[in-house]
Amino acid sequence: MHLGRLLKTINCGMRYLGTGAKNEHRPEVLTVLVIKLTTRCNARCTICTLANGNKTYSHQDLPQEMAHKLISQLQKTNTLLVGFTGGEPLLYEPLPEIIRKLTTAHIHTHICTNAQLIDRSMARLLGQAGLTSASISLDHPHPDINDSIRAGTKHSRVVSAVSYMQQEAKNTRLSLGMTVTRHNLSAIEQMVGFANSIGINYLKLQPYHTNLEQHIKPSTQADSLCIRDKDLPVLLENLHLANSLSLSQGVMTNIPMLLTELPNSIYGIRRLRCLAGRMIAFMDQTGRLGACPGMLGDKKFTDNSLLDLWNDSVMEAASNCPQLPRCFDTTYGELSYLMSLVSRPRSRMLQQFWTRFKTWG
C-alpha cells in the first residue's frame, strides 16, 4: 500500500469523522472511486433494477479512452482504491488491462461480480493483473434458492469460480457479498458456515434498500424485498447466531455493525457520518461523477479533469441527502473495500478482535 496516500487518507478521515464539524472543507483525498463500467449484465437478479427487463438502462459501457485517461489522473487525487461494478464488470473486455495499469501505479483494485464468467483463464488474467480484492455475489447457501434469487446465475459456478481464483489469483482477497432481504434473512448463519467451507474468510451483508438506484423498481416488487420493523426480531436473532459462528470459525463479517446500525436505519436514526463526497465518489458509465449513485452531477469526465470534478460543489450535496438516515451504501459499503486491503491476523483471539474492529473502520 502506498504509504503517502495512506497517511493522507488517515488524516482526512480523522479530520472529518473525529471533529464532529459539518462539511466546512473540501478534502484533498479521493480515497475510493467506484466506477460503473457497464450496464450490461448476464443475470436478472430479483434485487436489481435490471430485473424483469427494466428499460431504464440502455446497454452502455464506459468509453475505453475515458477509462485509460482516468488512470493518469488518479494519483493527483491521492486515490487508494478503485472499485469496479456494473452491470457485470467482467463483461467489460478491457478490465484486466486497466487493473494491470492501476496496479503498476500502486492503486488497489476491487470488483463486485456474480463470478459467472470466472473460469481458470479469467482467474489467471485477474491474478496476473494484480487485482487486490473481489466481492462475489451469493444470496443463499442452497443452490436452488440462490439461483431463483439471482436468475441467470448458477450457484455451482460461484463455487467453481472461488476455486479457480484461489488457485490462479492467490494474492486476491475474496469475499462473499449477500444482499439480505425478507426472503433470505433466516439463512445468514448458514452463509457464514458455507463461506468457511469454501475457504472464504470475509462475508459482507448488505441489507436491501430503495434509497438509491433501486427507487425506480416498481413498489410492489421492492416492498416484498425490504426488511421492515416487524422482521427485526427474526433478523436480529439470526445475526446473533451468525456472529457467534463467525467468531468461532474465523470468518470476518460486518455483523457487529449491523446489530447496532440496522435497527437504527430502519427507524431513521443515523450514527455514523456518510463518507460520500468526502472520501468516496461514484462515476457512472457515461463519465458523470457524484457523491454516490443517487447523486450524480451533470459534468462529465470527458470535459473536465477528475480533480476538478472532485472539487465540484455537487459533492457537497451528500451532506443534505434526505435518505441519509436509511442509507447503507457508502459508509457501510464502499468503506468495506478499504477494510479488505488489510490482511487477517492469524490467532483466534486477534481474529475476533479484528472482526469487530474492521466493521467499524
Image (tube, grey):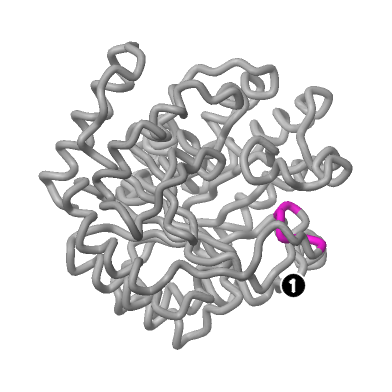
Residue 201 in the image: x percent, y percent? Answer: 47, 54
Looking at the magenta stretch, what is its main secondary structure?
loop
Task: State which region is magenta.
Answer: 47-52
Residue 281 in the image: x percent, y percent? Answer: 39, 43
Front-lying residue, 117 or 286: 286
Q: Is residue 246 left or right of residue 181?
A: left
Say which residue appears at 84% left-offset and 38% top-offset: 223
Q: Is residue 222 left or right of residue 290?
A: right
Q: Is residue 198 left or right of residue 155?
A: left
Say which residue appears at 77% left-offset and 37% top-offset: 226
Q: Which residue is mark 1?
A: 152
Local SS, label 1? loop
The image quadrant of residue 244 is top right
- For residue 117: magenta? no
Residue 69 in the image: x percent, y percent? Answer: 27, 66
Near mark 1 (Cα within 10 A), the count class, few <14, some 14-19 or many ≥20, is: few
Front-lying residue, 214 or 196: 214
Say which residue appears at 43% left-offset and 73% top-offset: 166
